[in-house]
Image (cartoon, rainbow, N blue to C red):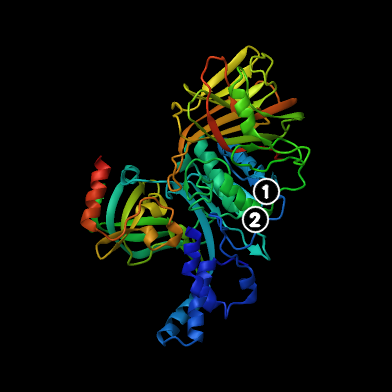
Amino acid sequence: MEISKDLNTVFVGILVGSLLMPGSLLAGMILPSAEAWKEFSSGCEWANPITWRSMNLTSTHLADTKDAIVHWNDSGANLFMDQTTGTAKVPYYTVNRSDVDWNGLNTQSTCLNGVYNGVSNVYLNSFKLGSDRTKIVSVSAHETGHALGLDHTQATSNGGYATMWAANINIIGPTLDDIRGVKTKYGAVTSNSQCTEWKTNGDVTHNGTCSGSNPALDMREFITTAASNSKAVATTTSSTTSLPSNGALVMTVKVKATTVNKFIMGAFTSTDVSNTLNRVAAIEMSSDGFWLVRSTPTGYVRSQIGIATPAANTVYFLELIIRDDQITQGLVFKDDGSATVPPTAIGKATTTVQYSWSTSVYYGTGVWTTTSSQPKSDYTISEFHNRLLSYT
Amino acid sequence: MMPMRVKSSFFVYTIVAAVAIGIGGHALIESQISQANAQKQTLYLSASWDGYSSFKNLAGNSTNIVSGKVISVKSSDAKSTIPTTDFNFQIDKSLKGDLKQGDIIVIRQTGAEGADQIIEIPDDSLLKEGDSIFGFLRYSSEHDVYVIVGGPQGRFINQDDQISSFDSVNKDAQWIQIKTRNTPIESFEQQVKAEASS
């Protein structure tokens, strides 16, 4: 792994140099991690809350930075980025610089006794970012990751892709490797009542405290059931919890179909998709394309995400973000199957749901069959994750 | 206190330690230089660029493709919130754009060396006087300077007319996708031209 190579080049320096190195510096070192991510500076982190402030962000940059911060706040790590109007640890700026070629820039905070004690500025370069909202969120999330103390990832431990990949690849929120990074750095959330652990290989958790009587559910069983049942959506349910009134639901999944029919990931209030009162916000992956779906009092409305149609035996990343202001975004990426090739952005769609989510909801992934004559689909999912957390 | 990057620290300590255990008189000179540099605090920036996977991508985003040499530091602004350094760069050959052999242009890079600190992007370390590079550049008419497209991605090292990508000399730039090692400059130019025009 690249990090090992990096550190090997200086390993002799460690051995020899450590003979004369002051103890305080030596104590601050971190041994090479088995993970691909690495920390920006040795052993330093912010104390919560990590205040952030828009110094002069454009309205677009501000909205997309909020999205980016939601992603990190919902990563399951014990970090809380709070917006402030006062002095901020992480100030965000919009700059318009044609004399640089970077999309975003972050300045490292000073560090004292393992705690950042200064300011870590984030600059978003509108000259380079233009109006590409996916790119803006991606760059803001990336620079925020730096501000939190993460360095660039050069290869991910799970073969997937990361927000902290050095070149911007339109990954808008922390993926598994990023999450491992911040969890290792800040610890995992333990006092939160929400079961937000990222599970792989089809396992899924539901909102609530994970325990013996409230275990993580195996999504694969539900998909099997749904695939043989018309008008069904496989899901895991929460009977008592509504979506946060001031926060966001972020859902991600990696999915592959042997036969593409209808697959859906999202939040809804009824498992009966023919129920006209059902409230739905979801990403649908069907043979005719990727769609952001929302329900209205008169039926479902679909907005196409990109123009591609899903290919069989191809891995896609789906990401759904439902914000408290009811703006809902659906994003799709294609996994090109190599740790050295970034995923391809298929597209992004944005819509606004017409009502709040102040009711009990179901959320999950599953096969969506609308007629019993449609062929069964064979979907494999992994890295399904619900992140449901208020950001204030 | 300003944090020092671990690798830089290791380098300094390696030299200091080498002196301590008496490895050659030459090391003494290096030690003195390094100790002088060690007085400067190093502050690191982190930048993100668009990713480039082919010469065609790079060339398409470049106003100029040139080879040449850094002849001097024109100016340095280490005190700005976004520090930059302007380098005088003499053109040896131009593959794209209106520059010609002998022209001297200004390449602006983010980062600067001040009196008491060095500020730089680890994977896009500052150019140095005497560096010969093959560069994919974008002209900023607003500032009348050139920038290297994609940071380290558009910067290729020319050593004795052998071209290597920047990751060959900077371990932090391993992530770049267009990699080449010791490619004869004629072959490199042909490849760039072919892909740029495809």
Residue type, label 1? Ala
Between B84 and A180, the residue placed more toward the observer is A180
Left/right of residue A363 with respect to residue B147 in the rendered view = right
Chain letter for mark 1: A
Residue B180, how many percent across, how many down? 32, 56
Q: Residue at x 69, y 53 (%)?
A: A187
Q: Which residue is mark 1?
A: A77
Dots 2, 1 in contact, CB < 8 A: yes
Residue A374, how many percent across, how many down? 52, 17
Residue A189, placed above or below residue A278: below
Left/right of residue A29 with respect to residue A191 in the rendered view = left
Crowding near the residue tagged with mark 2, few <14, some 14–19, many ≥20 C-alpha atoms within 10 Å: many
Q: Which comes before the other along the chain, label 2 or label 1?
A: 1
> In this view of the protein, can residue A331 be seen by the observer?
yes
Residue B196, how many percent across, how many down? 27, 43
Chain letter for mark 2: A
Q: Residue at x 27, y 57 (%)?
A: B67
Q: Secondary structure at mark 1?
A: loop
Picture quadrant where residue A262 is located: top right
Residue A288, placed above or below residue A82: above
Residue A305, placed above or below residue A103: above
Residue placed furthest toward the top: A298
Residue type, label 2? Lys
Q: Which residue is mark 2?
A: A185
Residue B117, placed above or below residue A36: below
